[in-house]
Image (cartoon, grey):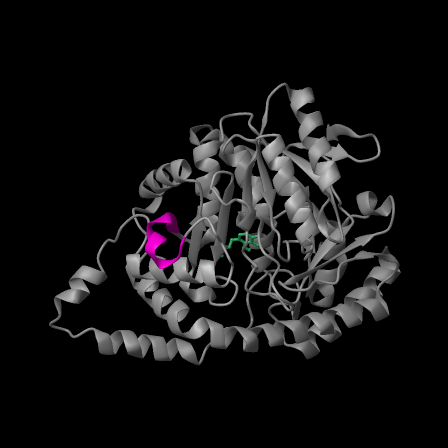
Amino acid sequence: MREILANWTQKIPESEIRRLLKSKTKYYLAGGLPGNLPTEIFPEILRELADYYDAEDQRIVNEFQYGQTAGWPGLRKVLAERLVRKDKLNCISGEADWEKVLISTGSQQAVYLALDILINPGDIVVTPSPAYLGFVTTVVKVGGHVVTAPTDSEGLIPEYVEDTIIKAEKKFGRKVKILYVVEDSDNPKGTTLPFKRRQQLFEIAERHDVIVICDAAYKEMQFEERIPSMKTLDKDNERVIYTSSSSKEAAPIRIGYSVMPEYLLFEAEKSKGYLDLCTPTLTQRFAEIYYDKYIDSELPKIIQKYKEQKDAAYNALLETFPDGDYTNPSGGFFIWYQAKGEKAYTFDVKKFNQDVLLPNEILVVPGSAFYPPSGHSYDPEAREIEPLKIIKGGMRIGYSLLPKDLIDAGVRKLGKLLSENQ
Ligand SMILES: Cc1ncc(COP(=O)(O)O)c(C=O)c1O
């Protein structure tokens, strides 16, 4: 029967994270499920919605209908205002520019739409190494070609990104089309790009005429003051596709939103129309109230809890892990650890996870999950594009789900097992 399937189904494996979600362990450090949600305000919003609509009211028919493909205007207005007030975007003026905000079903859909409308077979996309698997895998699914660029404890290294673009264009004889950046608390490394690097990456994108997909999925989950996005440098709204999400602090509503150049917005809306016609109006009404009235008072409480969880994980790591490279995130859900030197490429965390961690009630996500099924890597030593180089000896340690005492115990246990097995 396999021959009736589309070709991509044979090239793209099941996501490692989805596979790991099926295993239940006491110390679950694998998925990025948000463990702290504003549970008290959810019933309030539901009550507010119920009070607003009267059973006889035509508004129910009007407002819980199929909606505009680009999203419910009320929600887009609230978000347009917030994007200017909180994120300091200057390519839109605020509420009046609500039509420039595109709503999606999660930001994953926005990322998919961006790739769907931009990628022709073989088009090159430069991503961090390692990178969000929902992005790199989708690039390959739609026919693109991933070239990874090295990262350090602050994320992408601009000098290497520029050289990656130059060398990839030379090697493959075609222009690089997209640069993918997660500025705040990247997944999986948890790194945050300093403003200077954001500026440099934007300039590189301009110099080489590359579109930037700036994925701001973790921007609300910052323990420190937010750094302005690269999108604020794109004053004429010509180069950067900016996507963000409700998912990290209000996961149940699964609202994504994006701002992008107008010629892309038109195509993205067209593509979304064929994917889902529209995002459910009920959740958009819910999200409108959430963003209008609650998010700013709820966020600090939620962020404080994640910070405590991160501190528990980080301190346990410092005390128990063998020598290696690791990050100390200033936001988001993940710490990255990788074995030192050559072991970063040889120590097999996927096997270690399965054979050693799982029987000990622990799970992490192996570094190898954060690479595309095919592609190339820039090697900073050779300064050349090489076959894909995977940091197999890396792991993503998620601290978002468990309470801090379990995180502390789980990471300590993990450190002990790593010391014995690495
Ligand atoms: C970097 C990054 N971008 C995008 C997404 C998609 O998020 P959602 O569709 O829940 O908004 C995720 C989810 O984990 C992510 O980590």
Q: Position of residue 74 (x, y in %)?
A: 30, 61
Compared across the picture, whether 214 is left or right of 361 comes to left
Q: Is residue 63 left or right of residue 69?
A: left
Q: Is residue 284 on the magenta stretch?
A: no
User: Which secondary structure is most common in the magenta stretch?
Assistant: helix
Q: Position of residue 412 (x, y in %)?
A: 79, 71
Q: Looking at the image, which residue is at 50% across and 45% down?
A: 235
Quadrant containing the N terminus in the rendered view: top left
Q: Residue at x 80, y 30 (%)?
A: 383
Number of on-image labels = 0
Q: Which residues are magenta?
A: 93-102
The correct choice, above or below, for 378 with respect to 38 in the image is above
Question: Is 137 situated left or right of 326 in this image?
Answer: left
Establish if 41 lies above or below 342. below
For image coordinates 49% across by 45% down, the residue present is 111
Question: Percent x, y for residue 398?
Answer: 66, 63
Name which quarter of the figure residue 22 lies in: bottom right
Looking at the picture, tell me which residue is in the foreground, 192 or 283. Answer: 192
**Quarter assignment of residue 407:** bottom right
**153 to 123, vertically: above or below:** below
Examine the structure image and report whether residue 94 is included in the region drawn in magenta. yes
Which residue is drawn at the image coordinates 53% and 48% (left, top)? 231
